[in-house]
Image (cartoon, rainbow, N blue to C red):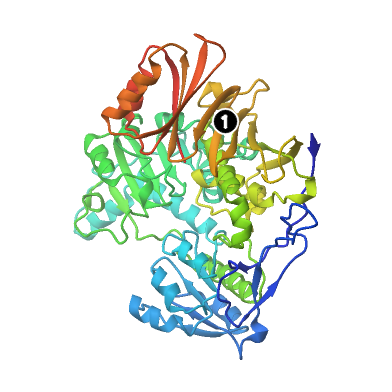
Amino acid sequence: MASFKTPALKTPSLSFSSNSRLPSAFSVTFPDNLRFSRSSSRPQRRFLIVTASSASIPGKPTVLVAEKLGEAGLTLLKQFANVDCSYNLSPEELCTKISLCDALIVRSGTKVSREVFESSAGRLKVVGRAGVGIDNVDLAAATEHGCLVVNAPTANTVAAAEHGIALLAAMARNVAQADASIKAGKWQRNKYVGVSLVGKTIAVLGFGKVGSEVARRAKGLGMHVIAHDPYASADRARAIGVELVSFEEAIATADFISLHMPLTPATNKILNDETFAKMKKGVRIVNVARGGVIDEEALVRALDAGIVAQAALDVFTEEPPKQDSKLVQHERVTVTPHLGASTMEAQEGVAIEIAEAVVGALKGELAATAVNAPMVPAEVLTELKPYVELAEKLGRLAVQLVAGVGGVKNVKVSYASSRAPDDLDTRLLRAMITKGLIEPISNVYVNLVNADYTAKQRGLRITEERNIVDGSSESALESIKVQIANVESRFASAISESGEIKVEGRVKDGIPHLTKVGSFEVDVSLEGSIILCRQVDQPGMIGKVGSILGEENVNVSFMSVGRIAPRKQAVMAIGVDDQPSKQSLQRIAQIPAIEDIVFLKL
């Protein structure tokens, strides 16, 4: 076994596939340190790196600012570019203007669609989102058209936290309702008796930048603060007097719940009928994160049933919400029109942050806030594509197996290959493993250029080792193994003999396969999603599980059983094309020989 370190990567600002048409404002370089050759006798394969160069653009570049931006940001932009401030453009007007622009800056109200990128005819080099979320930007289209997308994720942290606390206090003391009442000529002191914050438990769901700032301020109000976040640092939480707990414990014990999680497939409608039913009766909820994390119809039902006493919302699934929205009109709901970042100081900070990122990108520099993936030449992807897919999916599987409250901090990646250490650069594979580990539970978009930075920011330490094995050098890798140390697992059999969560895979006939879970050998294609069952090995198990899935019209693509010995403990890995219902998974779990079950979404 040989350990190795990969060299530091000088990342590009933009990159294209080898057959892309290059705008005249781009230069092409071929760094020698990015090699993917198998031997010195063959031509070396390199990334095609394309960087924006303002020097070859006649005059200054043009930046279209499509939504209001702070004066400090505009001043910074004007020092480098021609700035066109055109607000409230229709989609058609935006598509007409964009062909004359090198950069576009938007907030959340402008949709940057595929049509926008197509209309730019290759001139648009960077889109800057003045804020955090990039739901309104078509990232796939941006990447296809060689356009970098950057955001401004840090400048509005304090403003969002302060607004969360403002809503918390206003809700607890019925400020909005009492204000409306007195302006209507009423004097109802007895009706608007509130509740105290001191001594109450607040659960902060999402302990990132905003969540941790809310926690600090809640502590100052005399509240007991608990938090849940899969990546939160226990040391950082302890330093500000916060206890990290599981999601189930957080929602079951909290008097107040403050949401600060991103909107991802894993968090979409995470507060729903089922989770509301597990909450303490009379809980109060604050949301300054993303509207989609709450099932709004379920929240109305919980309010009407008295499970939720009050809610204070700054964000909604649809913005603006409909005027006749039952949730908005509910007498025990306080609402604001997405004001989390709306302070003078935050607006100026966001303006400066996004202006610096856009100017840097136009100069050919790469912002750490780049959110879309660069493209690599077709010849490199041809060889690495199956391993890239394998790496990301192993990361996704591994992180979904994690349970508990400690967070993922130490990950070890082992590559088994017959090639010499310098014949295969693994940085792209490491980036994809990082992507798989982080994206399912965050709103960060991980790619080759920001993977190491993102991992470092989250306290995630990834080490790599290479195992030299016998085999053909025609195959880039024999296998990839991902191990997560010092965590609990949702599926006990995923824990290896050495105590880490372990998943291993390889590429067969161009398709990524899962070949090992913990100590159990399996063989299942990593397509669709996977159900893992720990069972007592006995006849008829495959048929029983298959029948339950078949009744729900869930197609099984692969099924594999790894066992210690006949009639002993075994692990069944089932590849499915569709997501089974909770009821079906519960029925499988109730089969007497099934000891544990987990569904993993790829």
Image coords of residue 599 (percent x, y): 43, 31
Q: Quadrant of residue 79?
A: bottom right
Image coords of residue 438 (percent x, y): 56, 45
In the image, what residue occupies the spot 55% across and 21% down? 493
The reply to whether residue 67 is in sight is no
* Nearer to us in this view, 519 or 196: 519
Image coords of residue 180 (percent x, y): 25, 57
In the image, what residue occupies the spot 59% across and 25% down? 518
Q: Quadrant of residue 152?
A: bottom right
Q: Relative to residue 355, is residue 386 depicted above or below?
A: above
Please indicate whether residue 466 sits to the left or right of residue 483 in the image.
right
The reply to whether residue 22 is in sight is yes
* Nearer to us in this view, 421 or 107: 421
Q: In the structure shown, which secondary structural element does the residue marked by tag 1 occupy?
A: strand
How many numbered markers are drawn?
1
Q: Quadrant of residue 480?
A: top right
How busy is the neighbourhood of tag 1: few (under 14 within 10 Å), some, or many (20 plus)?
Answer: many
Q: Quadrant of the N terminus?
A: top right
Image coords of residue 473 (percent x, y): 72, 44
Residue corresponding to mark 1? 515
* Nearer to us in this view, 372 or 19: 19
Residue sitting at the far bottom:
59
In the image, what residue occupies the spot 59% across and 68% down? 16
Q: Amino acid at mark 1?
A: Thr
